[in-house]
Every structure is written in C-alpha cells, then in structure tokens.
C-alpha cells in the first residue's frame, strides 16, 4: 500500500542543511498496524505527515496504492488523499464553531456526498460509538477523551483505507488511551483498516503488528519481537 | 456546502461580536456614501433618454477668444448660425433653437408667478421627445405670441382648469396665449423650462424694443442654444466642417482681434460631458462626479482595508480551522470560496445597514437638494445596482484575506499557529494606517477652517443692522399703504422697502457717469425707499436720504456709497451732494447722499461702488424694524399683511435668519462634517482592529515580560508607542498639507479669519486623544492580563 524510497527531508539552516529524515525506505502492506517510535525530535511526525501527503519530502519517491504520489498534480493528490486517508491528532483539532455532528460531517462535505447519505453515515457512526446524545454539543463542551473520539470518528467517517494517528492518546489518561487503542485494534481486525500510529508508549505500540524505530531521522533496523 | 459556510460565518459573527461590529459598521458607513453617489449618478444618467434619433442630434457650440486672448468654450451659439447652416449646406434634416428669456414675472387674472421661459422653434416637438397633452405639435408654436406650458406650470397657474386659450401677461414681453400643454414627460431632461414661447414672437418684440436684437446678431454668442438633427447620409465630420467654414467667413467679415469658432457636440455627450460656459440645465458636472466617485471610493477602500486587517487579526483562530478543513480533504479553492462567501455575507449585512443609513440621509436630508436629486425613487433597478455594488465590496474586501488564509499549510498551522505570518511585513499595513489618519486630519482641519470662516462671516458686522429686522414679501400689494399701516403696529419702529435683502446679492448693475459724454462706470444697485437707510442703520457721511417728492414715476435721486466716490472722481462725500449723474443713458438724477461702506454682498466679497436707487415698482421686500422679537408683534404684522394679500401664503422671516442660512453654507459644512466623521470613524475602527491584532500576537511576549518583572505602565508604553508614532507621522504629513489648503481656501475671501496654528494643533490633539481612547482599553486589558494564563494557553 505504502512504498517510501530514499526519502530525505531537510531544512536549510544557515548555509548548511539540517536533516530531519535521511534515506527512509519503508513498505507498509494493506491491513497492517504499524507503530512509529523514537525519541522526541527524531522525525516521527514529519514522516507521518509525508505518508499522509500533508508534507513533501526534499527528495525521494512515494507510491501509494500503486500510484506515484509526487508525479501527480496537487489537485489529484488531494483527491487521492481525501478518499483513502484519515488523520487523528494528539490535540484533537476539532473546529470550535461546529457541533460534534458538523465536525464529523466535514470530510463528507468535501467528498460531495449527498445530504441524505451524509446524514445516514453520520448517524450510523454516532450510534456505533454511542455518542448520539452529544451530537449537538460544541467541542468546548466535551472532555478530552470525548473530543479525541470525535476526532477519530471524523477520520473514519469517509471509510478510509488508511488511518494515520500522531500520538492519539498523548493528551488522554490511561483508561481513555486504552479505549482508543482497543478501538484501533478492532478497526484493524474487523474493518481491515490499515493503521500507522506515532507513539511514545511501548504499551500502545504493542497493539500493533509492527514497530518502526526512528533515531535522528533514520530507521533503526534492530531485530525485535512483537508481543500481541 | 454553502449552508455549512453560512453556518460557520454566522457563528463566527456572533462569537467575535466586536470584530463583526467593526466590519459591518465601517463597511455600511462607507457603502452608504457610495450608494448616495451611485444614486446621484444613476439619476444624472437617466437624463435625456427619451428623445428620438439621439444618435443624430448635435448641439452647435462656440469657441471664443476675447481681446485678451482668453479662451472660452460656450454651450451656446448665435441665433443666426443655424439659418446659414441650413441655407448653405445640405446636412441638416431638422433643427431647433432655444432662446432663454430669463426669469419673467408672469400674471394671470388671479395668479402671479415667476417662470423661466425660452423662445423656441416649431420643430421643438420633432427634434426632442417631448409630447403634448393639449394642442397639436405642428401648430402650437407657429403663431406669434403663443406659449406652451409644462404640465406643472399649467397647474400652478390654472389648477385643474383648461389652460388652452388663456392669456398670460409677461412683465417685459407682453401677452401670450396658451396654445398647448406639454404632457407627462417620459424622463428628466436638461431642457426644463417652465414654458416655451413661439420663436415667431421674437421679431415683433425686437421691433417693439422689448428685447434687444439677437435674432440676427452674430456677436451675441450667448443668446441661445442650437440643436440640429443630421441627415441619415451626413456625418459629424461634414457638420463640423460646415460650422467651421461659417466661422471662417465671419472672421473675414469682422476684422477684430477677437475670434469666434464653432464646434459640434453630440447630444449624448451633453449629460456629464465637458464643462462649458453658459451651460443649459442640469447636465451634471463630470469633474464633480469624478471627485465624488474618487472620495467615496477612497472611503470604501479604507473600510475594506479594515476588513482585511481584521481578517488577519482573526487568522490566528481561523488558521486552525483552515488546517483541519484541509486535512479533512478540502482543496484550496474550496477554502478560498468559503472565505469569499463569508465576506459576501458580511457585505450583504453591511448593505442592509447601509440602506438604513442611506434612508436616514435622505429623510433627514442634512445636505438638502444639493445632494439628493429631486423626486428620485429607489426602484428595483437601483436596488439591483446596490446589490451588485455590495457584492463588489465583498469581493474587494474579501479576496485578499481569503487568498492568504487559504494558502495556509495544514502541517504548519496545526503545529504552531503563532509561527504563521500573513502578508510578510507590517510596513504595508502601517503605511495604510498613516494614510488613513492623514486623510482624516486633512478633512477634519479643512472642515474646521471652512466652518469657522463661514461662521465668522455670518456673525461679523457687515456694516448694516440685522437685529430685530423682519422681512416681508411685498407681492403686488400697494407698498406705501402697507408700509404705513405696519409702521403703526405697536412694537414696530419703522418700515422700509427694498428690492433685495442686503448681504446677499445686489439687485442689478447699471452704467453711471457724471458728464453726459464721459465713459460710464458700471455700478451695483439696490432700489430702496427713504426709510430704508434708517431701518438698516446705514451711516450717512454726507447729504440725506431720499427727499420725499411726489411720485412722478421718474427717477430723480440716488445715494452712493463711499467706494463710488473715487471712480466717479469725487474728492470727498460733501462734494458729491447735489451732483448730477446720467444713469442707464437715460435718466438724469441728483446725488442725495453718501453712505459709509457696508458689505452689501456679504463679507466674503470686497465692497465695490454701490448705488441706492428709489424706484417704487422695483420694491420686493419690506424690512420692518421692531422693538423686540415677541410673538404678538409678529401676529399683529401678519394680520395687517393679510388684509392686503388675502389668500396668499404669508412668509415672514427674520433678516438675521435669512442671512445666517445663506452665509454659513450649512449644506457644505454638514456634508464635509459628515465625510470627516465617516473617515475618522473608519480609521479608528481600523486602528482598533490593528491593536487587537497586535495584542493578540504579542500576548505571549507580554506574559513573559511580566513574569520577568515588567510593570503594567511599562507594558502599556511598550504597546502604545508604535501606534502613537504612526499618528504622529500622519500629523507631520497632514498639518502642513492642511495649512496650505486652508491658506489657499481663506485667500478667496475678502474678509477672513486668521488660520491660526492653534486650531490645527487642537484638531491634531483631538484626533490623538480619540486614538488613545480607541486603543487604550485594549492595551490596558492586555497589560493587566494574568501572565500565567497567557503562557499556559500557548
Ligand atoms: N519548519 C521547520 N524548520 C526547521 N526544523 C524543523 C521544522 N519543523 C520541524 N523541524 C525539525 O524537525 C525535527 C523533527 O520534528 P518532528 O516534529 O518530526 O519530531 P517528532 O519526532 O515528531 O518529535 P515529538 O516526539 O516531540 O513530536 C525536529 O528536530 C524539528 O526541530
Ligand atoms: Mg511529533
């Protein structure tokens, strides 16, 4: 599904370059549940954003679903991205002026889903995650866990094949975090959604099937075992 | 999707009430000005749209060079021109002349009115689109002494009675018989006389000496207006060559230094066309219209700039939304449209408010007729234009911020908003703030100077008495009886008659000489009676007021002012008394007295030689000096007046009021005041937005400084320094500019206030104070905010 080859990312600093990512080669098959780990500043978020097409590398090539991402026009890239990828952030990032219902609906608006269908899809999700009662509240009226739940539902609403999550449990307590991880696992197993998450927690990483370790912008190839 | 946009727009509007208010209020204010201009232009452009063949109608105009080499371009032309054109060239299909009479007192058995009339040819109804509701177009203007009235004039004279066949007596022209009535006109026209007289009357009138010769006078270039219809086959160029040829023939005839040339003006270019001397009717002035468009556009831009500025201020909160939407799959174009829709929404709300403002301007009419065209209506079409205009405003204000906001990179904005910078540096925005305030100061200072000058002229002593003087119209009532009876009313001290109020304009201009064969000097005059000098408290330097002599209908005495002594070569006032003078080449009069100079045309004009004459039939007003201004005196005077003028509307006014209104030019003062109010308001609103932006972006910095021990005062001075600097720069530019402007303006007046640096400085500090108040609360709030809180939210 994802094939990254020789990905470099640098920022100019004075006359020289600061490398954030160096020669990243990474393949992720459909249906995988990958955790990216590494110390702060090692380039995890940068890598995730590149996978999510929110950011461009300085060098390298990227094939997503057998299509060469950097050879297409920006417009097509957004099309490809909005059809297949859902994003979850550490700090939720909901639109303050929209209700829970409207926040969840937003991606569908940009995919030109018909109004009736939109309604059915959103209601279905609200039902599934048991927050029907909260649908008319604004983000400020929700707890952090609830906000993150809404953020995840928003990422899921368009039925993406790939979920990218940047420290999704970073702002949550452990119970809430566990719930979210269970949810991810379920999505991965039952709905066959590919998941790539950035995390600092070994425990959370354990939910996945594979761990990618980053250090100073390079993938560490340490043989490791994964507990399930 | 659009619904979603509106929802967000609306919620944002409610959430950021102050921003919304600044935006909508500022836009609405400036839009109301623009709408007023739009309304005026539309009204003006609607003129003369109802004539047939407008593409082939031309007006013949005159280019004149006088002895001194000065050039004039006149809308008028000599009356014989078109005859020659018709005879010697075969380019005309039709033509018509208008030969204005001027304002003419006109009486019927029961009414007396002043009307504006013009002689015109029979072809009037063929060339122009006017139609008749009574009478036949081919004959109404054929017979001599025929008159065609407009519908309104006919109603003023005859009410609902049939006017056709009735006779009107015109003061200098004699009797005219009504031959027709112009029907409802399909639109406004620059040709809008009250009545049209048959051109065939003119030869008779000239022969009888009732009109000075004009019909065959090539030198009388201002006599009339000539409109021609070209043949289908003829071209404008041919017409132009023809009139030029005629002009060159004239040149060889008259061998003088003066030169006369003719030109043609397409009919469609008369309205809002080039500025011409002796222009006819309300053609509108292109220069004025352009100035109006310019000023209103500047004010509009100023308001739009505020919108842009405030959008940037809010971009910190909107940026996150942009990021999320992009992550949710929005294309840049969709984000862009969202913000454009939002600004359109805003401008539509502003349109609603602007419409309310416009209604208020119209109903309250602070600028009277000058600003608002008579009888206009806000119709569907105009509303359509307003709507279009508000959409234009929305785009003008919204495109730039929408473009900038939609360019946000989601990764960056979601990571750290405060790293996002819009429009690079601040210099552009600072420059605009300086420009806004410079403009404000110039307008404010100019308005102050203007109103002070006119206030001065309204209140300064003009050399005659204005207190407790009532002005009564004299109408047709017998002046002597009325004057005597009113003098007997208790509380009335004296009554004197005059042709015109002092302090406005002289009632006429006549040649006078002290020897029959001398070169005459031209001198302004009023016609007044013997009492008038005393009523107005004019000071006699020598001689006396008019002696009471039997009214022989012949002029016998005049009084001159001091300023007339020198041009008449009289050494001192006493020498003048008893001297003979020849007036108008006909009457021989004696100088009865000399009065001290007074400002008979107001203080803005220097005193020139003046003559007080004593012709009873020229009296129009009675000036009544009273002991006070009690209601009972007014009532008693009214009763007497009504005895002599039964059924007439009674218009009595205090002279002081009449002069004050005329002199203080309230129309212009209030309009300037209004414009400066708007300019200042919009600039202050913009500044407020800028302050909010700055305090918002510097909140973290303020927090850190406070944690490090900075005092509230230090923070306040840190935050306000930049703004005050901008205002001071604006002041440094505006003060000299407005000083020069004020100086040039005041130089137009004979008696003027001193410009005084004081008032300039006061204006500047007034504005500075306003600015401090505007920014003060925001800055104070930012300075006292709890630093811990500010730092935590980052
Ligand atoms: N715009 C930028 N300019 C310069 N350097 C940048 C920029 N953005 C990110 N970096 C650098 O890139 C490196 C990687 O950043 P990134 O956000 O990917 O780290 P991370 O692994 O996600 O860290 P964390 O666990 O703290 O979230 C950091 O050292 C950061 O300083
Ligand atoms: Mg990170």
Image: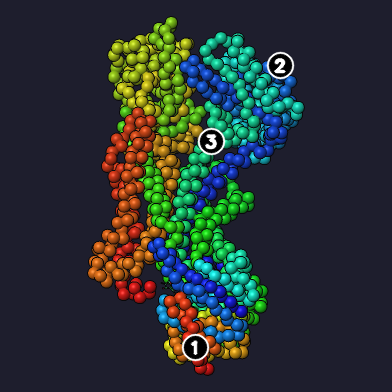
**B212 and B257: which one is in front?**
B257
- Name the residue located 35 percent from the left edge and 36 percent from the top edge: B740
**A87 and A47: which one is in front?**
A47
- Name the residue located 48 percent from the left edge and 50 percent from the top edge: B301
Q: CA distance from mark 1 to mark 3?
A: 88 Å
Badge 3: chain ID = B
Colour logic: rainbow
**Residue B761 in the image: x percent, y percent?**
29, 45
Disc number for residue B285: 3
**Residue A198 in the image: x percent, y percent?**
48, 81
* Helix, strand or loop for disc 2: helix
**Residue B477 in the image: x percent, y percent?**
49, 28
List the residue tagged with mark 1.
A223
List the residue tagged with mark 2.
B88
Instruction: Determine the image quadrant of residue B208.
Output: top right
Looking at the image, residue A67 lies above or below residue B646:
below
Disc number for residue A95: none
Looking at the image, residue B410 lies above or below residue B306:
below
- Name the residue located 34 percent from the left edge and 73 percent from the top edge: B791
Relative side of B370 to B558, left or right: right
Q: CA distance from mark 2 to mark 3?
A: 35 Å
Mark 1, residues whose alpha carbon is within 10 Å: few (<14), some, or many (≥20)?
few
Badge 2: chain ID = B
Instruction: Determine the image quadrant of residue B85.
Output: top right
Q: Furthest residue to the bottom?
A: A228
**Residue B628 visible within the image:** yes
Nearer the observer, disc 2 or disc 1? Answer: 1
Relative side of B508 to B282, left or right: left
Any atom of ligand 1 within 8 Å of the CB at mark 1? Answer: no
- Same chain for mark 2 and mark 3? The answer is yes
């Amino acid at each position: 599904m994802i094939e990254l080859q020789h990905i470099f990312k640098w920022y100019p600093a004075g006359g020289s370059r600061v490398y954030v990512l160096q020669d990243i080669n990474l393949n992720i098959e459909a249906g995988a549940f990958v955790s990216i780990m590494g110390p702060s500043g090692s380039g995890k978020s940068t890598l995730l954003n590149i996978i999510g097409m929110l950011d461009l590398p300085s060098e390298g090539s990227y094939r997503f679903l057998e299509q060469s991402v950097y050879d297409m026009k920006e417009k097509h890239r957004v099309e490809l991205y909005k059809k297949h990828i859902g994003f979850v952030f550490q700090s939720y990032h909901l639109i303050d002026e929209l209700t829970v219902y409207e926040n969840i609906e937003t991606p569908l608006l940009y995919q030109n889903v018909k109004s009736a269908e939109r309604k059915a899809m959103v209601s279905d999700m609200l039902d599934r995650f048991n927050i029907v009662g909260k649908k008319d509240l604004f983000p400020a009226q929700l707890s952090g866990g609830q906000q993150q739940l809404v953020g995840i539902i928003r990422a899921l609403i368009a039925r993406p094949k790939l979920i990218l999550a940047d420290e999704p449990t970073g702002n949550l307590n452990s119970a809430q975090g566990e719930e979210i991880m269970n949810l991810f696992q379920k999505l991965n197993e039952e709905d066959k959604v590919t998941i790539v998450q950035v995390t600092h927690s070994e425990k959370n990483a354990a939910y996945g099937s594979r761990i990618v370790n980053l250090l100073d912008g390079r993938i560490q190839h340490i043989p490791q075992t994964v507990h399930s | 999707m659009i619904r979603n946009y509106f929802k967000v727009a609306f919620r944002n509007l409610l959430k950021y009430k102050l921003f919304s208010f600044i935006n909508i209020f500022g836009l609405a204010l400036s839009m109301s000005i623009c709408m007023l201009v739009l309304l005026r232009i539309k009204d003006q452009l609607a003129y003369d749209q109802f004539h047939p063949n407008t593409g082939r109608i031309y007006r013949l105009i005159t280019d004149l060079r006088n002895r001194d080499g000065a050039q004039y371009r006149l809308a008028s032309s000599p009356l014989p021109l078109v005859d020659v054109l018709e005879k010697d060239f075969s380019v005309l299909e039709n033509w018509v002349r208008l030969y204005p009479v001027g304002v003419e007192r006109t009486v019927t058995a029961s009414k007396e009115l002043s009307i504006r009339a013009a002689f015109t040819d029979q072809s009037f109804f063929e060339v122009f689109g006017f139609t008749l509701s009574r009478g036949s177009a081919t004959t109404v203007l054929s017979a001599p002494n025929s008159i065609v009235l407009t519908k309104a004039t006919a109603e003023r004279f005859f009410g609902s009675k049939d006017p056709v066949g009735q006779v009107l007596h015109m003061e200098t022209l004699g009797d005219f018989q009504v031959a027709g009535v112009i029907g409802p006109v399909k639109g406004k026209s620059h040709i809008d006389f009250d009545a049209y007289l048959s051109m065939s009357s003119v030869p008779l009138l000239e022969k009888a000496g009732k009109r000075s010769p004009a019909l065959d006078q090539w030198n009388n270039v201002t006599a009339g207006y000539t409109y021609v219809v070209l043949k289908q086959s003829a071209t404008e160029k041919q017409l132009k060559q023809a009139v030029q040829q005629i002009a060159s023939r004239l040149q060889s005839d008259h061998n003088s230094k003066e030169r006369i040339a003719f030109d043609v003006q397409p009919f469609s270019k008369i309205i809002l066309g080039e500025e011409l001397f002796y222009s006819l009717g309300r053609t509108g002035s292109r220069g004025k219209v352009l100035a109006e468009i310019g000023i209103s556009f500047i004010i509009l831009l100023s308001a739009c700039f505020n919108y842009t500025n405030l959008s940037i201020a809010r971009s910190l909160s909107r940026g996150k939304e942009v990021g999320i939407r992009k992550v949710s799959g929005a294309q840049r174009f969709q984000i862009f449209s969202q913000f454009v829709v939002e600004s359109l929404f805003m401008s539509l709300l502003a349109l609603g408010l602007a419409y309310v403002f416009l209604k208020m301007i119209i109903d309250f009419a602070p600028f009277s007729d000058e600003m608002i065209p008579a009888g206009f209506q806000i119709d569907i079409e105009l509303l359509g234009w307003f709507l279009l205009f508000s959409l234009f405003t929305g785009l003008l204000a919204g495109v730039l911020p929408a473009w900038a906001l939609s360019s946000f990179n989601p990764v960056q904005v979601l990571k750290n908003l405060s790293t996002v910078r819009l429009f690079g540096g601040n210099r552009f925005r600072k420059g605009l703030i300086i420009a806004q305030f410079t403009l404000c100061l110039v307008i404010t200072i100019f308005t102050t100077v203007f109103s002070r000058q006119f206030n001065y002229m309204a209140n300064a002593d003009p050399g005659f008495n204005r207190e407790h003087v009532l002005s009564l119209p004299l109408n047709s009532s017998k002046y002597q009886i009325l004057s005597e009876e009113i003098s007997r009313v208790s509380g009335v001290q004296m009554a004197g008659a005059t042709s015109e109020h002092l302090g406005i304009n002289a009632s006429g201009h006549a040649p006078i000489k002290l020897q029959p064969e001398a070169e005459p000097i031209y001198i302004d005059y009023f016609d007044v009676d013997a009492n008038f000098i005393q009523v107005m408290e004019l000071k006699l330097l020598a001689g006396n007021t008019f002696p009471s002599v039997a009214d022989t209908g012949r002029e016998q005495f005049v009084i001159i002012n001091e300023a007339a002594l020198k041009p008449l070569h009289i050494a001192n006032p006493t020498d003048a008394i008893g001297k003979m003078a020849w007036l108008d080449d006909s009457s021989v009069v004696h100088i009865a007295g000399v009065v001290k100079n007074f400002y008979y045309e107001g203080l803005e004009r220097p005193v020139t030689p003046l003559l007080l004459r004593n012709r009873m039939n020229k009296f129009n007003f009675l000036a009544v000096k009273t002991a006070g201004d009690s209601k009972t005196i007014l009532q008693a005077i009214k009763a007497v007046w009504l005895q002599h003028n039964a059924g007439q509307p009674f218009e009595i006014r205090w002279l002081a009021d009449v002069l004050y209104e005329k002199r203080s030019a309230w129309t212009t003062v209030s309009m300037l005041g209004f414009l400066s109010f708007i300019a200042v308001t919009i600039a202050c609103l913009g500044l407020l937005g800028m302050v909010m932006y700055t305090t918002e972006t510097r909140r973290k910095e303020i927090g850190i400084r406070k944690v490090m021990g900075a005092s509230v005062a230090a923070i306040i001075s840190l935050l306000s320094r930049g703004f005050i600097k901008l205002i001071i720069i604006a002041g440094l530019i505006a003060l000299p500019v407005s000083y020069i402007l004020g100086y040039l303006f005041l130089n137009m007046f004979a008696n003027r206030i001193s410009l005084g640096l004081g008032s300039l400085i006061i204006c500047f500090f007034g504005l500075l104070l306003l600015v401090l108040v505007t920014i003060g609360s925001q800055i104070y709030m930012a300075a006292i905010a709890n630093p811990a809180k500010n730092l935590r939210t980052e």
